[in-house]
Image (cartoon, helix red, strand yellow):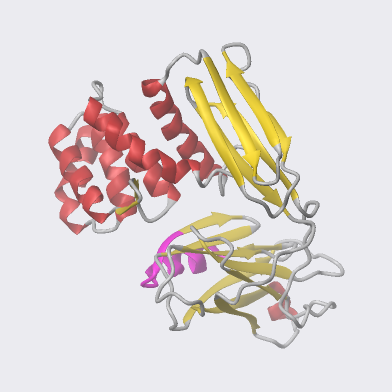
Amino acid sequence: MVDDALLCLKKNLSSVHDAYPKALLAYVFTMAGDRETRQSLLKDLDEQADKTEGTVSLSDMETTAYFLLAVLSTPEVSTDDINYASKIVPTLTKLKNPYGGFTSTQNTVLALQALSAYAALTYRETEDVKVLVKSSEGFQHDFHVDKKNRLVLQQASLPEVPGQYSVEVSGNGCVYVQTILRYHEAPPQSEAFALSVETSPKECNQASKEHFDILLQVSYTGTRNTTNMVLIEVNMLSGYIPVKKSVKKLLQKPLVKKVEFEPDKISIYLDQLDKNVQSFSLSVDQETEVVDLKPATVKVYDYYHPEDKADAEYDAPCSTVPPRSDGMSTSLIAPRGTCCLCIIKL
């Protein structure tokens, strides 16, 4: 059965053009031991990759993680493989959030699996590493990483925000350095996207109470010609669930790369956006009746520049509470100006 499945995939390789299925197939044929097919797919992915400042990245984090796994999952990994992988790893590490994870559970699992494979192949015993953090205003803090504390998270507050800091590293070993900036106030809203959300029908009756459509219109309004990959997150109203058939139809739209289906949220991945308005729609059914129903939020942002974003709210046709007129949602933000630097051994 496995042989037949691999043969079917191999026969249809010529119809695969996007980076995501190519990366997934490269990993499949790597695990299957088909070196020729693997090498051909890796070559195609290398040609599609974005190569800037000595790094290699593909269209999104999940694709990049599969790419890294394909490079490192052969029985005998060569020095050339490790050297190439070292150019992919920074793409993943720079997207890690302050809590050690990534944008979703799926992305976290794949990214950590790929980074773990790289760490296992490049592991070196840490003897004694010193990380000196200094500011232009006289602040100074030393971090020491050795065999005893190499798995312990070390952090210190940076007192000058904004400020200029430098990091000096000495010793023998490898450490991971990350800076984290949290805000008590939301940063100024960017005008990178135009986003509108409506429901259809608008009239409240028994039919629209039980079933209605969510209509989205989005376009890029920033300074670039096009965006990177864009993610649209449509949160469900309490008591409502998405209709699977309508979600699957989203995959027929030209720019839609992938759709993630959850009971309380739909995530739509787009290859990119430009100035042209793109329209999307999906349907929802009432599963549980909820009293005093509150609006739900739709968010759109550039995957690699999440500061480029826009939010909007929508409500059910029969909701008793109208959505906010400014299209903004209320959120809790951490204390303003809190900035720290974390050091942990890879």
Whether residue 199 is visible: yes
Residue 240 in percent (x, y) is at 69, 64
Q: State the image quarter where residue 28 is shown.
A: top left
- Tell me if 40 is positioned left or right of 123 in this view: left
Q: Please name the residue shown 51% across and 37% down the image.
A: 109
Position of 197 relative to 51 (above/below): below
Seen from the viewer's position, the closer of residues 219 and 165 is: 165
Name the spot of residue 210 as percent of width and height, x first. Answer: 70, 73
Does the magenta portion include 254?
Answer: yes
Could you tell me residue 120's position as x and y percent? 41, 21
Q: Looking at the image, which is closer to me, 320 or 91? A: 91
Question: Nearest the camera: 271 or 34?
Answer: 271
**202 magenta-colored:** no
* Residue at the bottom extreme of this rendering: 203
* Residue 32, placed above or below residue 59: above
Q: Is residue 243 left or right of residue 271?
A: right
Is residue 346 something that shows in the picture?
A: no
Q: How many marks?
A: 0
Question: Residue at coordinates 41% horizontally, 68% vertically from top-left?
Answer: 272
Quadrant of the drawing holding the N terminus? top left
191 left or right, relative to 54: right
**Residue at screen point 82% across, 65% down:** 290
Q: Read off the magenta span.
A: 243-258
Res. 98 image quadrant? top right
- Residue 197, how many percent across, how many down? 62, 79
Above or below for 233 versus 119:
below
